[in-house]
Structures are given as C-alpha cells and as structure tokens.
C-alpha cells in the first residue's frame, strides 16, 4: 500500500492543532478506502517529513487513532490499520454510554462528571441514559445503544427488579464492551468498578461507636441492590464494639423512589422509633437523599440532630448542596469511579482486555465529618 503524502499540518484548517490535522487526514484516507484493514502505515519519521511536523505530533495523532480502535501498534513491527477499522468508521463507534438509575440525585452527578471528563480526554462523546431504576426503560435504552453499535457502555444496573443477564448478553455477542459500576449482574463476565457496601456499613458503625453510640437504627428506601450489605456491615461493626442494631429498628420501604408516600413511611416509622424507651441514639441511611429526607422529617417532628439523635449518611466525596454538606457521611469518589470505567471501556475497545475480563476496581472510602454526628448525651443515655 502506498500512502499519498499528507497535506502539511502547518496548512490552515480553521485553527486545528497539528496533531488533529494529521489525524483528520488519516481518517479521510481510511474513509476513502485508500487505507485498508491490515495495511501498514508509514513510519513515524516518514509521516513527520511528509506532513512537516515533529515526531511527537505524529505520535500524538497515532495515539488518538489507536485509542479509537482504528489502528494497532505492534512493537518491533510497525503500525497497522485495525482489522475492524472500516466497520468502526461506518458505525460511528466513538461514543461511550453511561446507563444509570438517576441522573440528578445522590452521587450520580459526580459519576457523570468523571465519565464525561475521561471520555472527552479520549475524544469520545457521551450518551447518558437515565433509567429511573426501571427495568423496562433500561432494556429499551440498551436496545437502542446496541442498534447504534456504541463503543462501550458503563452501567449501574437496576435493582427493582434486578437486571437479568439476557439484557446484557446480546451486547457482548455484538462485541460491545460493558463495565459494571457499583454492582455486577449474575452470569455476566465483565469488569467492575465499585465500592464495598459492607465496608461502608462498618465505617458508619465504627464512627457511631467512637461517639459512644451503642444502639442504632437503619433506614433504606428499598431492600434490593446493596442495602443488605450496608445493613450487615453496620450490624457487624456495632456488635463487635458492644452495640447492636435491633431488627425492629431496621426500616425498609418497598418504593423504588423518593415520593410523598415514602416521606409518610419515614414519618410513621420515626415516630414509632421515638416512642420506644430503648430507642436508638443514631441512624444510618445508605444514601444522601434518604438521609436528607430523614433529617427534614426529624426537624418537622421537633427532633434536633445531633442533640437528640445522630445521623450518618453515605454519598460522594463532592458534598454538593447545603444539606448534604451538613451530613456526617461515609464517602466515595464517584468522579474517579467514572474515570476508571472509561479507562476499562477504552482498554476493551482497543482489545487490550477481553470483553469477559473480570477486573475489579474497589474504590477507597473516606469520611466527611459534617454536623450530624455527635456524642451520646446524658438524656440519650438515660433513655437507653
């Protein structure tokens, strides 16, 4: 194959950087069929001379084409057009998708920020699909993404009900990389970027114990997903430190969303908790939005936090919002989680990892002190 000499990268093209001009030229050659799958590209030196640019500029342009899965570089042999380059160009595979249960609340905005940031750094556009934790809505989104032959999908699977394997399997069959965020789907092998819900619960329990709390309550919007792990971690930590999480103080709602009905559920159960002589001195909610609602209901009841009862939440390290900043919380860096998901998708797209890779990245946890965790008061000790 003989490659036509590229236009000088110093020629005016709307202020485009030199490496982008060279990349655009090579993309044109690929699209026109003058570069075919399996063809060897000229050496970096030859491209630098013909395009009148430095070798660093050539390396930059080739690196971006390699990230897009259009070329592959073989050490000691050279640079070749990827076997699937033509198909990738025709199908517009330079888009990553993020499929999440909620695009506005909790730590999902931070997850989106990290995902967008890492994708744009690789010149990939992003599609965000909000499933509202609805299985059928998620299925529709995945079918449309599959039809577009998307470059890769990072997904936080639905929990109510749990996502079945048959929603994911067709994507793998069509060669589309999948990365699970937060939780896996049974019977599907794919990378996972997550945090340990068990350790989240344990950290919350240990923080309670440090402030003298020995009796706790647990409020979660639903039993599905990671909720049982949060509860288990909290209970194990408390028992280890001489405390307890009584079953009568574990409150789950069946609603998958924060609604007026859920607010009434919280009010009813919190009132019941406060009628008990042996009531808890601290509450753990495994999601910021749930903790915020508990905080507001307690305020309506005339209960002071943390004077009358302490409150711990779980959320992202970016504490956005006046109320979220006040919450004492176990936190995880969701932005970094999103960046890790893009990195894994990129590696699979470039065939550095197989689609069935089982890499697990477990994100570290941190602590945001906030204002809602205080020591057990004398009044609380008398009650307990």
Image (cartoon, rainbow, N blue to C red):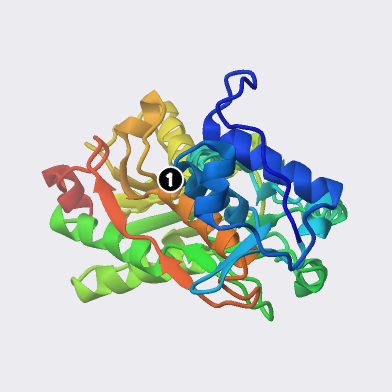
Q: Residue at x 44, y 30 (%)?
A: 296
Q: Position of residue 57 (x, y in %)?
A: 48, 41
Q: Position of residue 136 (x, y in %)?
A: 83, 55
Which of 34/250 is in front? 34
- Can residue 63 be seen here? The reply is yes
Choose between 359 and 248: the one closer to the eye. Answer: 359
**Which of the two residues, 288 or 249, is positioned nearer the viewer here?**
288
Q: In the image, is residue 175 above or below residue 282?
A: below
The image shows residue 224 at horizontal and vertical percentages of 61, 63
Which residue sits at x=30%, y=32%? 326
The quarter of the rendered structure image containing the N terminus is bottom right
Q: Is residue 1 above or below residue 232?
A: above
Q: Residue furthest bottom?
A: 187
Residue sitting nearer the eye, 93 or 63? 63
Mark 1 lies on residue: 56
- 158 sits to left or right of 272: right
Q: Quadrant of the C terminus?
A: bottom left
Q: Is residue 178 left or right of residue 201?
A: right
Q: How many marks?
A: 1
Q: Residue at x 58, y 77 (%)?
A: 357
Neighbour tally class for label 1: few under 14, some 14-19, many 20 plus, Cα within 10 Å: few
In this view, the residue farthest toward the left is: 378
Q: Kindly identify the residue that appears in the image at 81 percent across and 52 percent down.
A: 34
Q: Secondary structure at mark 1?
A: helix
Image location of residue 186, percent across then percent down: 66, 77
Q: Is residue 303 visible?
A: no
Q: Is residue 216 above or below residue 356?
A: above
């Amino acid at each position: 194959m003989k490659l036509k000499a590229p236009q000088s990268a110093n020629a005016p093209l709307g202020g485009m950087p030199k490496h982008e001009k060279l990349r655009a030229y090579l993309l044109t050659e690929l699209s026109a069929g003058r570069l075919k799958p399996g063809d060897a590209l000229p050496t970096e030196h030859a491209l630098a001379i013909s395009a009148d640019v430095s070798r660093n500029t050539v390396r930059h342009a080739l690196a971006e084409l390699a990230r897009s899965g259009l070329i592959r570089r073989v050490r000691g042999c050279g640079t070749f057009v990827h076997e699937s380059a033509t198909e990738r160009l025709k199908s517009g595979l330079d888009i990553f998708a993020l499929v999440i249960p909620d695009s506005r609340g909790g730590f999902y905005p931070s997850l989106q920020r990290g995902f967008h940031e890492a994708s744009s750094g690789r010149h990939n556009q992003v599609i965000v699909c909000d499933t509202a934790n609805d299985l059928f809505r998620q299925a529709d989104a995945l079918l449309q993404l599959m039809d577009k032959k998307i470059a890769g999908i990072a997904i936080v699977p639905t929990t109510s009900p749990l996502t079945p394997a048959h929603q994911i399997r067709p994507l793998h069959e069509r060669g589309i990389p999948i990365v699970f965020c937060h939780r896996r789907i049974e019977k599907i092998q794919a990378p996972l970027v997550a945090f340990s819900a068990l350790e989240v619960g344990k950290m919350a329990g240990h923080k309670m114990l440090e402030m003298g709390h020995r009796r706790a309550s647990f409020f979660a919007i639903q039993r599905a997903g990671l909720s049982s792990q949060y509860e288990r971690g909290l209970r194990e930590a408390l028992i280890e430190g001489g405390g307890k999480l009584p079953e009568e103080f574990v409150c789950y709602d069946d609603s998958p969303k924060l609604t007026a009905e859920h607010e009434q559920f919280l009010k009813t159960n919190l009132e019941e908790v406060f009628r008990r002589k042996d009531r808890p001195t601290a509450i753990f909610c495994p999601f910021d939005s749930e903790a915020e609602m508990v905080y507001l209901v307690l305020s309506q009841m005339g209960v002071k936090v943390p004077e009358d009862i302490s409150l711990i939440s779980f959320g992202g390290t970016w504490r956005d919002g006046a109320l979220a900043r006040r919450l004492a919380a176990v936190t995880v860096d969701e932005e970094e989680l999103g960046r890790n998901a893009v990195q894994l998708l990129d590696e699979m797209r470039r065939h550095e990892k197989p689609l069935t890779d089982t890499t697990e990245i477990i994100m570290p946890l941190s602590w945001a002190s906030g204002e809602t965790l205080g020591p057990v008061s004398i009044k609380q000790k008398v009650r307990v």
